[in-house]
């Protein structure tokens, strides 16, 4: 018998077993039909023998005259030979019937063995499917963990710890069209920190404006984020924030700044991942973008500076 673990790796095994079982069932049906035919023939022969025996008995009783006696003897001898032939043929049929019964029994045993092997293979397949499901679940969890690690590494790559962030905004034209169409009106910068264990922050920009600046200005906002060391920091957040849209010809940068309102919920200790953004809804006029090299090669640079002098 083959190892079911080896058989389960063959994609044609189940089809082969189905074919074997079909063949065995066909053999059993054929043997059953032959059995029925042989039994019918045996029944016919038995009836013929019984009929011949009755005729012989009747002939022996009715014979009186010598001439009739001779005729009766000849007829009785012929009937006897026919009777012997019938008995011989009946014996042959009985032998065939026994052989067919043995064949059917062997076929039934083979079919039982095949079914048991098939059950073993199917159980092995079910075990392998359960193992594959478990492996796929484990891989999915690892993929999630890997994605989290990649995101963490990406954040670390772009993060700074001195309160300043130089944000390179690429694909300006596409992002601007997305903002105008409403597909994506804003997006966030990478996070940055006032120090290694300081405030965690980021910026949010609307390339088609927001609020009073919608459709006419670029809006830039400052976001206080929930950090790992918030319990050790001073709240509310009070540091001065400066935004700079850099002129890539270094002629005239767009600069705006604000000091946080201590009573605003935007600068309290975060209870969620981010506080409500606060900043400059009319940071830079859209018409002003064409007067200087604020966008070049489809790229814009925005600098955010947080005053850390009193931290």
Image: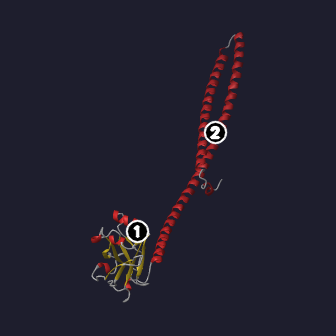
- Which mark, by number, is residue 172? 1
Residue at 68%, 28% in the rendered image = 89
Q: In the rendered view, would you say 157 is above or below 34?
A: below
SS of the residue under disc 1: helix
Q: Locate residue 119, reporting x and y percent.
A: 57, 52
Q: Earlier in the sequence, mark 2 or mark 1?
A: 2
Residue 286 visible at all: no
Q: Locate residue 213, reporting x and y percent.
A: 29, 71
Count neighbours of disc 1 (C-alpha within 10 A) and say few if under 14, some if 14 to 19, many if 20 or more: some
Q: Are circles 2 and 1 on residues that touch, CB within 8 Å? A: no
- Which mark, by number, is residue 26? none
Q: Quadrant of residue 304?
A: bottom left
Count neighbours of disc 2 (C-alpha within 10 A) and say few if under 14, some if 14 to 19, many if 20 or more: some
- Which mark, by number, is residue 101? 2
Q: Locate residue 90, reporting x and y percent.
A: 67, 29
Q: Residue furthest bottom?
A: 310
Q: Which colour assignment does the render follow?
A: secondary structure
Q: Locate residue 299, reporting x and y percent.
A: 43, 71
Between label 2 and label 1, give the one nearer the viewer. 1
SS of the residue under disc 2: helix
């Amino acid at each position: 018998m083959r190892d079911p673990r080896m058989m389960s790796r063959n994609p044609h095994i189940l089809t082969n077993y189905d074919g074997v079982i079909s063949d065995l069932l066909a053999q059993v049906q054929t043997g059953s039909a032959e059995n029925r035919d042989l039994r019918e023939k045996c029944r016919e022969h038995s009836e013929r023998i019984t009929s011949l025996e009755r005729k012989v008995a009747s002939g022996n009783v009715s014979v009186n005259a010598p001439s009739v006696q001779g005729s009766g003897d000849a007829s009785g001898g012929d009937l006897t030979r026919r009777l012997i032939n019938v008995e011989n043929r009946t014996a042959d049929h009985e032998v065939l019937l026994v052989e067919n019964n043995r064949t059917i029994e062997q076929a039934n045993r083979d079919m039982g063995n095949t079914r048991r092997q098939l059950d073993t293979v199917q159980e092995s397949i079910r075990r392998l499917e359960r193992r594959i499901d478990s492996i796929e679940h484990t891989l999915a969890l690892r993929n999630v963990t890997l994605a989290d690690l990649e995101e963490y590494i990406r954040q670390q790559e772009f993060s700074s710890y001195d309160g300043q962030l130089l944000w390179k905004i690429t694909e300006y034209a596409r992002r601007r069209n997305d903002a105008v169409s409403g597909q994506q009106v804003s997006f966030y910068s990478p996070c940055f920190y006032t120090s290694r264990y300081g405030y965690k922050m980021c910026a949010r920009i609307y390339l088609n404006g927001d609020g009073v600046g919608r459709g006419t200005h670029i809006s830039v906002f400052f976001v206080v984020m929930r950090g790992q060391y918030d319990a050790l920091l001073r709240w509310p957040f009070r540091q001065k924030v400066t935004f700079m849209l850099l002129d890539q010809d270094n002629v005239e940068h767009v600069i705006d700044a604000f000091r946080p309102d201590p009573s605003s919920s935007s600068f309290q200790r975060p209870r969620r991942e981010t506080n409500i953004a606060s900043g400059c809804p009319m940071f830079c006029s859209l018409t002003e973008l064409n007067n200087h090299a604020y966008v070049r090669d489809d790229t814009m640079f925005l600098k955010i500076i947080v005053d850390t002098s009193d931290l």
